[in-house]
Image: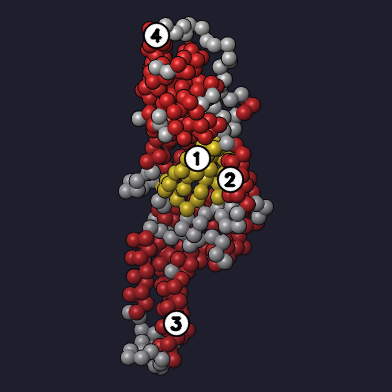
Amino acid sequence: MSLADALERAASELAGDADAIRPANGDPIQLLGSLDHGAAVRVLTWLLANEPEAGDELAVRWAEQEDGAAPLAAVDESALPKAGRKALRRARHRLRSRGVAVDEAPAEPVVARLPDVGDALELGFVSLLDSRGGQLVYLVESKAGGGARLFEVVLDEVRGVVDLEIYSAGRSVIRRFLRDVTSRARFPAQEADPSSVRALIARVDAAMPADCARPRAFGEWRSRLLAGVKEASVLTPGEQARDALGDETNPPALKRAAELVEQGEFGPWPPDRGRLETLAEKLREQAESRLIVSGARRTEQLNSLVQDAAVELFSGDFAGQTARRFLESAYGLWKSGREDDARACLAASSAFSGDAPADQPAARALIESALGPLLATLRATSGDQQSGKQDGESSLLVEP
């Protein structure tokens, strides 16, 4: 990593010093002039500890400057890894060769420090699912040197880990951001135990399809994001809701889950685009190939086609994926005070995990929602054929 890149990373980690680091644009001499003594020690210490090659370059350049002796003497060598200690000793040897004494640190105290235990910060948040089935989850942790780091992860039961963004800022900035995501009108986030958020990320990651590529940043931070998660030992947020509320599949609860889909609060959570297009084309072909004897019969046949589509769609892995989507939706409803609707989602989750997932009301509601425009067109075509209003086409109706 170049010195400029390493300094940009240092600016992200040392949020309190970022405004002094970035204007130097990676120039070590300009950087030395823009930092006060304490900041210079913090930056040099961080580089020697985390990016020793860049730290070596910076220390050597500072050893050539009169003002560079003080921060080089003030760095605590015992806090550095082997590569950082060797780099620091080389730079100090250069100073001694110029007649500068560096055996003793200057009187000004070293201010580079780790956060106090009381400063430790770890928070988790999960949002409701969007119409495609994507869910935003957040992890916040304190950073060495001050400030906080926020991970924003996009999860999808079908597509896996879709995206990862990482932000470093002061705690006040992070708090404002979290207030925004928890108070927004659409898909608000609810606070969750950080370990449960990590368990959710781990579960989606483990089930990720082989043909889906993980975000590059996720590979780099995966061990941090999944720290402390052991298989089956930590409940996800949705599993916590189920543990608290149960998942009884009574008819009123299942009907309410379908109503939530029909009202647009959840779903349609379609499968991947290719499978959805194949299903739509098959539905269109089947509808156009059937002879219809009456408007009532036409409606009956369309309803039968929708049920057939539900059976096809929810006969495999997609049923389990939909079950987990309802499961994780229950947590947000539960924590926002909508306990009855949370129970409805848990009931639907249990039903989609059962032997006949396509036979429950929510399955039909999801199909109707996902294929709404096509079904509306087919029903409208049926009405036109019934009244004889289609121009240039023979009616499919068989007159009695």
3D distance between C-alphas at marks 2 and 3 = 46 Å
* 1 or 4: tag closer to the N-terminus: 4
The residue carrying mark 1 is 167
The residue carrying mark 4 is 98
Q: Provide residue 386's location: percent of width, then percent of height.
A: 43, 89
Viewer-side residue, 311 vs 49: 49
Q: Secondary structure at mark 1?
A: strand
The residue carrying mark 3 is 380
Q: Quadrant of the C terminus?
A: bottom left
3D distance between C-alphas at marks 1 and 2 = 11 Å
Is residue 356 among what the camera can see? no
Task: Say which amino acid is labelled 4.
Answer: Arg
3D distance between C-alphas at marks 3 and 4 = 90 Å
Task: Say which amino acid is labelled 2.
Answer: Phe
* 2 or 3: tag closer to the N-terminus: 2
Task: Say which amino acid is labelled 3.
Answer: Ala
